[in-house]
C-alpha cells in the first residue's frame, strides 16, 4: 500500500441532512459526529446559522474535544463570521457561487434592475453585465476573506457551481483568493460533470493556478459522483468532500467510504490518518437509523428544501434542476427559507404575500420541523394553511424560539 495525503472533508451533518426526509436529533448528530471524528477525517462541517440548535451543537462538539475537526459552513455575511468565531471554531468553509448562471440570479444589482430582474443568463446578457457581476463577486468575497482572516480563522472557500463556471474566470477567482485560503473547494453542485471531463478540468485548473490546493465536492445527480471524484484525485486534487452513505439533497453527494475504499482497492492508495476500520461504524449507524441516499433519476431525487436553492429556482429552473423532463418538488422544513413560501404562494397559488409574511412562515415551519423531526410536503403545508395551523403558530410565536 502507498500512503497518500488527501484532505478529507465530511458534510454528513450539514449537506447530508439537507436531503428531504432526513432529520437528525441532537443526540443522533452528536453520536454521528464522534463516530465520524474517529475515522480521522480532517473536517466535519456544520452550519450554525441554520438555527440556534445547530449553533448549540457546534459549541457542544467543540467542548467535547472536536475543535480541531469541526468547521462552520458560512455565508457571506460578517455577522455570520462573527457567529462562527463566537462558537469557538478554528476553521470555516466560506461559500459563494462562481458560475455566471448563479451570479446573475444573486447579484443585488441585477435582482433590483428594472430590466434584468426577470431575466436569466440564457437571454443574451451583454458581456459588460457579465463582467460586472463577476467583478462584484470577487470584491464581495475578498472583503469577507480579509475579515475572516482578521478573526484568525482558517478558511476554505467553497466555489458553488464551479463545474458550470467560465474556466478563465474560475482561474482568476482561484488565483485572487489563494493567499487567504487553506484550500479551494470546487463544487459540482448539480452533478453535471463526467469522468472524462473531470480529469481534464482538474488537470488544467492545477496547471493554470500554479498547483493551487484544489479539493472537490461532487453531487450525484447523474450517478457519476464516485468516478468523478476518483478521477479528480488521479488528476491531482488535494482533497475531497462528501458524506457517509452519499446522503444529501436530490441524489446526494459522493460517498466518502466508497471513495476511500475505492482508492485503496483500485490503486493501493491509503489516505494518511484515516482509520479504515472506523468507516463502517458510521455507515452501520446510518443504516440502523434507516437513512439512505436517494437514487439518481428517482422521484425522491427531485425534492428540494434548501432555501437558497429554491430562491434561485424561482427565477431560473436550470439553476438547480438539470433534467428538463422533471419538475422540482418543493418541500418545507428546517433548511427552508422564505423563498419556499414565496414559491408556494406565487407559483402554485398565484396569491403573493409580503416579504415579512414569507419570513414569518419560514420561522414557523422551522419550529414545526424541529418539533416534529420531519419535513413537510407542499400538500401538507397547504392543508396546514387551510386549517389555520400555520397562522395559529404565527400568532403564538412569530419570530421563532
Image (spheres, grey):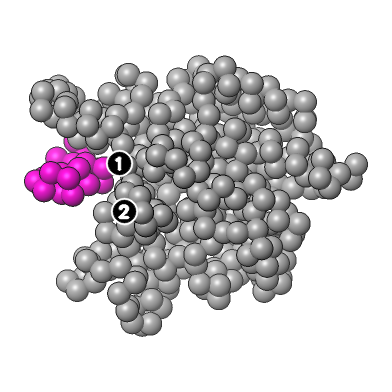
The crowd level at tag 1 (other Cα within 10 Å; few <14, some 14-19, many 20+) is many
Q: Which residue was labeled with disc 2?
A: 313
CA gap, disc 2 to disc 1?
A: 10 Å
Quarter of the image holding residue 357? top left
Q: Which residue is drawn at 67% across and 50% down?
A: 227
Quarter of the image holding residue 395? top left
Work out which quarter of the rendered image holds the C terminus and state it.
Answer: top left
Q: Main secondary structure of the magenta part?
A: helix
Q: Residue at x 26, y 46 (%)?
A: 339
Given residues 289 and 80, the one toward you in this image is 289
**Is residue 212 at all visible to an observer of this figure?**
no
Q: In the image, residue 220 lies at what x, y percent?
A: 54, 47
Q: Residue furthest front?
A: 325
- Relative to 282, is 47 above or below? below
Work out which quarter of the rendered image holds the N terminus and state it.
Answer: top right
- Relative to 235, is 368 above or below? above
The crowd level at tag 2 (other Cα within 10 Å; few <14, some 14-19, many 20+) is many
Whichever of labels 2 and 1 marks the residue nearer the N terminus, that label is 2
Query: Is residue 43 found inside the magenta-colored segment of the image?
Result: no
Residue interval drawn in magenta? 337-360
Q: Which residue was labeled with disc 1?
A: 330
Given residues 188 and 130, the one toward you in this image is 188
Is 272 situated left or right of 14 in this image? right
Q: Which residue is drawn at 14% across and 23% down?
A: 389
- The answer to whether the residue labelled 2 contacts the one labelled 1, judged by CB atoms less than 8 Å apart, is yes
Amino acid at each position: 500500500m502507498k500512503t497518500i495525503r488527501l484532505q478529507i472533508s465530511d458534510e454528513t451533518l450539514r449537506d447530508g441532512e439537507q436531503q428531504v426526509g432526513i432529520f437528525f436529533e441532537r443526540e443522533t448528530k452528536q453520536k454521528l459526529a464522534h463516530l465520524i471524528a474517529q475515522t480521522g477525517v480532517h473536517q466535519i462541517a456544520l452550519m450554525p446559522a441554520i438555527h440556534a440548535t445547530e449553533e448549540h451543537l457546534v459549541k457542544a462538539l467543540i467542548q467535547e474535544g472536536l475543535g480541531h475537526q469541526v468547521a462552520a459552513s458560512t455565508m457571506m455575511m460578517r455577522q455570520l463570521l462573527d457567529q462562527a468565531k463566537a462558537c469557538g471554531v478554528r476553521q470555516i468553509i466560506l461559500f459563494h457561487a462562481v458560475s455566471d448562471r448563479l451570479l446573475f440570479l444573486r447579484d443585488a444589482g441585477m435582482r433590483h434592475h428594472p430590466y434584468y430582474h426577470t431575466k436569466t443568463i440564457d437571454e443574451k446578457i451583454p458581456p459588460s453585465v457579465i463582467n460586472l457581476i463577476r467583478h462584484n463577486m470577487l470584491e464581495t468575497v475578498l472583503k469577507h476573506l480579509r475579515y475572516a482572516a482578521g478573526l484568525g480563522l482558517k478558511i476554505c472557500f467553497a466555489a458553488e457551481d464551479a463545474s458550470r463556471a467560465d474556466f478563465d474566470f474560475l482561474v482568476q477567482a482561484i488565483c485572487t483568493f489563494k493567499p487567504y485560503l487553506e484550500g479551494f473547494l470546487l463544487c459540482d453542485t448539480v452533478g453535471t460533470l463526467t469522468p472524462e471531463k473531470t480529469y481534464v478540468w482538474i488537470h488544467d485548473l492545477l496547471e493554470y493556478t500554479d498547483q493551487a490546493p484544489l479539493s472537490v465536492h461532487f453531487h450525484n445527480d447523474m450517478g457519476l459522483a464516485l468516478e468523478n471524484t476518483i478521477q479528480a484525485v488521479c488528476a491531482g486534487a488535494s482533497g475531497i468532500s462528501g458524506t457517509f452513505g452519499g446522503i444529501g439533497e436530490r441524489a446526494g453527494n459522493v460517498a466518502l467510504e466508497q471513495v476511500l475504499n475505492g482508492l485503496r482497492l483500485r490503486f493501493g492508495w491509503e489516505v494518511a490518518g484515516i482509520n479504515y476500520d472506523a468507516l463502517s461504524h458510521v455507515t452501520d449507524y446510518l443504516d440502523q437509523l434507516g437513512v439512505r441516499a436517494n437514487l439518481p433519476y428517482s422521484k425522491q431525487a427531485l425534492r428540494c428544501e434548501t432555501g437558497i436553492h429554491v430562491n434561485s429556482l424561482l427565477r431560473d429552473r436550470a439553476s438547480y434542476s438539470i433534467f428538463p423532463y422533471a419538475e422540482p418538488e418543493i418541500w418545507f422544513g428546517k433548511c427552508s427559507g422564505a423563498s419556499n413560501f414565496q414559491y408556494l404562494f406565487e407559483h402554485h397559488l398565484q396569491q403573493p404575500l409580503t416579504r415579512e409574511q414569507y419570513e414569518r412562515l419560514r420561522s414557523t415551519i422551522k419550529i414545526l420541523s424541529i418539533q416534529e423531526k420531519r419535513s413537510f410536503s407542499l400538500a401538507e403545508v397547504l392543508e396546514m394553511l387551510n386549517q389555520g395551523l400555520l397562522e395559529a403558530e404565527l400568532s403564538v410565536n412569530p419570530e421563532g424560539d
